[in-house]
Amino acid sequence: MGWQDKTIFVTGATGFIGGRVCERLVQEKASRVRALVHTVQRAPRIARLPIELCVGDLLDRNSLRRAFADSQIVVHCASGIGRGIVRSTRNLLQAAQAAGVERFVHISTAAVYGLTPPPGSEIEQAPLRRTGEEYCDNKIRAERVVARFLRRGVPAVILRPSIVYGPYSAWSTRLIEALRHDLVALIDGGSGACNTTYVDNLVDAILLALENRHSVGETFFITDGERVTWGDFIRAHADMIVPNRKLAEISKREVLARYHKQPGVWRSSLREARTLLFSRELRLLILKIPLCKQLLAPVWRELESMPPERRRWVRELLRNGSTAPQVSGETFLPDPVDFATQTGTVFFDIGKARRTLGYEPRVCFSQGMKLVEHWLHFANYLSDTSPISDSSLGD
Amino acid sequence: MDDRIRLAILGCGAITRSAHLPAVLAHPGVRVVALVDSDLQRARALAMTHRLECKSICDHRELLSEVDAVINALPNHLHAPVNLEFLRKGIHVLCEKPVALTIAEARACCEAADERKLVFAVGMNRRFEPSSLILRSVLDESLLGDLQGYDWEYGAPYDWETASGFYFARAQAGGGVLLDYGVHLLDRLLAWFGPVTLFDYQDDNRGGGIEANAILGLRHSGPFGDIAGRIRLSRTCTLQNGLLVRGKQGCAEISVEDESAVTLYRQIAGQEVSMVVRLARNTGPSGSFLRQLDNFVQAIKGAQKLVADGWQAVAVIELVQHCYEQARRLPEPWSEIPETTAR
């Protein structure tokens, strides 16, 4: 029996990668897919499919056990936050071990080598080292938990994709929004290694990991296998808005010099405080206090009585803090995470995945971006063309 | 003597908490006698939050002899059977949309109400928004000239706080975005432009699930002649979120963000101008759910005609059901299994 005849348990199913995994499993005729859903509100994309939505929480072993039920194969796409990344992976592996699963595919990340992978980390055997980045370090810990359960008999495979993009990806939606507000600058001409991974290429690798018996116990980098730079990636998105538009550029040296000038803790504290201040969560909490509700009601009424365009502008301002570059006249300064991510030089080698899994990326970067563009139009991020005109009745 | 209408609310989920109960508490003509929910704790908690001296129960059948009217806000698949139980006992019903999952069930509810001369109202609160009332007048007064068509987009990433999660199970919800958001639009379109003579429907349901995106082309034949329009609905994408009705002499726009006004676009002396039209004096209760409840109460007293009755809902459900039966697959080129394009 192949994996198509087994019960497949997918975590992170309401997310970008897990959602596509569910779609592809259905397209590839998987007979039974159980999708773990933490918050049912986020499920509209996968609720279109003939799969089971199982409400549960990876951090709550009882709900997880109920949702897991008799699953035979696991595709672990959920990420989590902070130590939750490690705990949720451990809980899931425990459930998988108890159920005696036949395959456990763990979606890790190439960021186990840090946001700026050092030279030498092109191949999977390169030693892991913590960089102090919470996400990266916890993904290392999660991989170690997987290795521990592998020794206890769970047939696990680790996949390390890099910049996974495609329809529904926040890489694209955030970039389009940032480009619209001039909040993007190419660092050193955009020469950093991007290591793009089109989501369907990753799903191909997952499916191969399910059926290939040589994959167990192995770790694989998964990318498109092309030397795409951040400049290529950002320009491809910018061209969707205005073709051949000139983008702001900034050198690594200037970024570092300007970071150096910044009152680091103060600035970041102020920024975080602003984010918190304008967050929906805080607003809802404050509105529970009757006096605050009474005081804020006129402000709310004022906002609601503004013309729609003005109201949208105010909302945008509150959401982003600013709709303009940080300092007028100065080139936009990328934040430290983007800077670290976009200044790597390492292109990961997918030779091992090719040899052992039989992985061959089938969607090239230019085709992947075309599909992204189709979806961005559909999702109204690029609003000049509406699919509404596809309807055949016409005027 | 307390002559207020004795009312129970069935279902204590998000819509009751955020809309129906606040409306009921603000209306002087009704008295809540019971909150009903299969989760007794939820019903009790809601009663306690509002310091209500009413029953909190989990079986609605206990109420059949104790109430004059009910608001049915249970999960969709329970609407019709529970409506029928109450209507057959002579109790007026205001039911959340959709009133039923099939045409037959919806008709049965209407017939049960008609036989006993009961009020059977449908939760179409958007009909009570000022923008809907103003647009109706704009059309009736021919302010746009001969009508040419309309486009209506309504969509945002789904964020409705659903207590039971029934929205995503086909058997309980009955459908996806068309049945959930779409009926609000179809209800008004049928009321404004008349019955549908032709439709073309596409959605992204992929075999047994419920659709998150839908596109519907419609042609009506009614008081304004033949008019074609398009609707796009989404639970995954943020759309334009507004209605644009185009006429030979101008356009009218309703924005979801401001349901208190209609924007008119006209040419004046060769110059395109826009005018925001609001009700100069907003008489009656404020808020669409309260106005809806008030209409229900006044209809029970015989003082007003129902604005949105069951038979109108039957027409909407008929259209929705036909759409589902004849659905075409919404093209999603990014969603097909990809061809090999890499070297």
Image (cartoon, coloured by chain):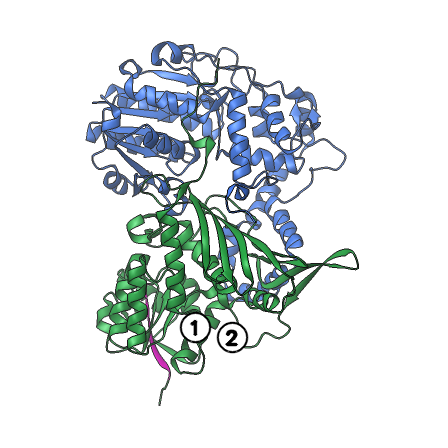
Residue A310 visible? The answer is: yes
Kindly indicate whether the residues beneath marks 2 and 1 are on one polypeptide chain: yes
Residue B55 visible? The answer is: no
The residue sitting at 61% across, 40% down in the picture is: A384
* Residue furthest right in the image: B269
- Please identify which colour was used for chain A in the image: blue
Point out residue B276 in the picture as x, y percentages from the top left corner.
67, 63
> Residue B287 vs residue A125: left or right?
right
Closer to the camera, A134 or B213? B213
Check disc 1 and report its element: helix, strand or loop: helix
Residue B285: which disc? 2
* Magenta stretch contains residue B54: no
Point out residue A116 in the picture as x, y percentages from the top left corner.
54, 20
The chain whose colour is green is: B
**Residue under numbered circle 1:** B293
Give the magenta part as a residue range: B4-11
